[in-house]
Image (cartoon, helix red, strand yellow):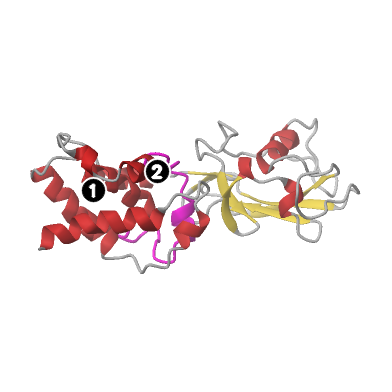
Amino acid sequence: LIEGVHFTKAPDNKIIIKRQKDSRSAPYTQEFTYTGDGRLTVADFLSELNARMPLLTADGKETEKINYASSCQEKKCGACAMLINGLPRLACSLFLCNIVKKGKIELAPLSKFPVISDLRVDREKIFARLKEMQVWLSEKDRDWKKGDRSLQYDAGQCLMCGCCLEICPNYTPESTFSGAASMIHAFKILEQNKEDIHLQKLKENYEKYFFAGCSQSLSCVKICPLGLPLDRIQSRANHHLRETKK
């Protein structure tokens, strides 16, 4: 059995899901039961729930299928990010047997993004902020390989799942601060772009949208599903900013 908390086979294991029909509707919760040994991931369980005909809540009431995002099922796309027992995690990466607490598991949508329906949220703001910051490569520096290529590789693995923003005490949907999701991609351009007007503008935006607002709580480091070295990447990105100010 997968290492973790004991998962009972009796039908008293409850999966409590926070649901919402659409962005204008009021949220509500529903309970569902699971009677297996817990070797399903959260994403697998949601798929299994939606395959039930009909789908019944724990109290026997018929309900609509649950809306959630999922794609690769292998921690490669970040689509299935949601709150699992109050923490932002990837539903495809956690087995039920490892996260059950007193016979219960709680699922909810990420709270810092607009809800589309149920567990599905709109993370468009992450990508919109990258455009605002001008995070793109205009012309590659001939000496870009002199940078820390291992950190550049790590930065390229970011899933844009939003877990870092959900856990960050400094990030709010209304704030200028854009969090680690923008920092990690800005870092790659700061490392590789030749010194030109575009790079200077990116440095100004990096200071405005990230450097000036980060309190160094490093909660993003602890929650990143891939365990990316966000602290080391941030340190290197900040180095580029300090070099400009000398």
Q: Is 167 colored magenta in this rendering?
A: yes
Give the label on residue 16, or none.
none
Q: Quadrant of residue 118?
A: top right
Q: Residues within 10 Å of mark 2 (few under 14, many from 20)?
A: some
Point out residue 215 in the picture as x, y percentages from the top left corner. Answer: 36, 69
The numbered disc on residue 154 is 2
The residue under the point 18% across, 53% down is: 203
**Within 10 angstroms of label 1, few (less than 14), some, or many (20 or more) residues?**
many
Mark yes or no: residue 112 visible. no
Give the structural element (helix, strand or loop) at label 2: helix
Indicate the quadrant where residue 54 lies. top right
Magenta segment, principal secondary structure? loop
Task: Find out whether the residues at labels 2 and 1 contact each other: C-beta distance under 8 Å.
Answer: no
Residue 1 in the image: x percent, y percent? 81, 43
Left/right of residue 53 with respect to residue 171 in the rendered view: right
Q: Residue at x 36, y 60 (%)?
A: 174
